[in-house]
Amino acid sequence: MEETRKPRLLVIVASVRDGRVGKAVADWFVDFARAHDAFEIEVADLKELDLPLMTEPNHPRLKDYTQEKTWEWSRMVEAADAFAFVMPEYNFAATAPLINALDYLVQEWAYKPVGLVTYGGVSAGLRAAQSIKPLVTTLSMMPIKEAIAIQWVAKQVDDDGRFEPIESHISSGTAMLDALVKWERALSTMRAPESVGATR
């Protein structure tokens, strides 16, 4: 009997600065999502990917890329069935690297759900979450309401650089992953067969 493939969740780490706490949060969430066991988990660290500011000459909706790094990013995003953004709040908004990474592509994002793991100080990154929603909906993505919001994040990273969640992070994380499963299943019927798999 053929084993059913798990949908693929791409976890995108949105902070690229030195000294970031986002990597610790992402490492915890990746382990948490793997233990949840509904998705195959992949990670895209925008610091490692190092996309330049959008430099492609052709409109991204055409999927006529000229740079290998763009094709690499395209293949990674297209292979995903759902997304989780691990993102801080900068000046009441999402990070420039995340917005840039979204702007590189169009077709590859469409009809896929996205969960938001935000962190910050008193606001827990919630204003960044609100700022990114108009962009992802324009790309035909579904931002789900279930989310993880981490307040005073620096206080929850230990001396070894590990993020230590509290119960609310665990319960909200479970709710978010459960919702991503349902939305991925529902939206899979809307993803056209020709959009699956990069052409290069």
Image (cartoon, rainbow, N blue to C red):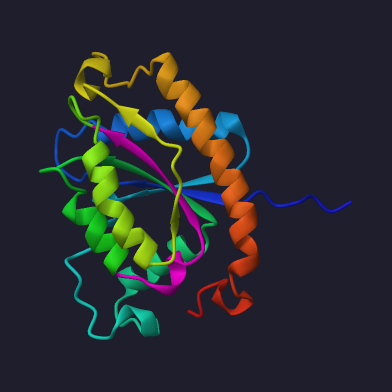
Q: Does residue 2 appear left or right of residue 198 in this picture?
A: right
Q: Does residue 4 appear left or right of residue 65 in this picture?
A: right
Q: Where is residue 187, by image quadrant?
A: bottom right
* Residue 166 vs residue 183, the one in the foreground: 183
Where residue 181 appears, x then y in whole percent? Answer: 60, 45
Q: Residue at x 32, y 54 (%)?
A: 133
Where residue 91 appears, x then y in whole percent? Answer: 10, 43
Q: Spot the residue most to the left.
A: 91
Q: Which residues are magenta?
A: 104-119
Q: Residue at x 58, y 53 (%)?
A: 184
- In the figure, 157 relative to 57: above or below? above
Magenta includes 108? yes
- In the figure, 84 relative to 2: above or below? above
Q: Does residue 50 appear left or right of residue 111 in this picture?
A: left
Q: Residue at x 52, y 62 (%)?
A: 79
Q: Does residue 47 appear left or right of residue 198 in this picture?
A: left
- In the figure, 118 relative to 93: above or below? above
Q: Spot the residue most to the right.
A: 1
Where residue 53 appears, x then y in whole percent? Answer: 16, 66
Magenta includes 116? yes
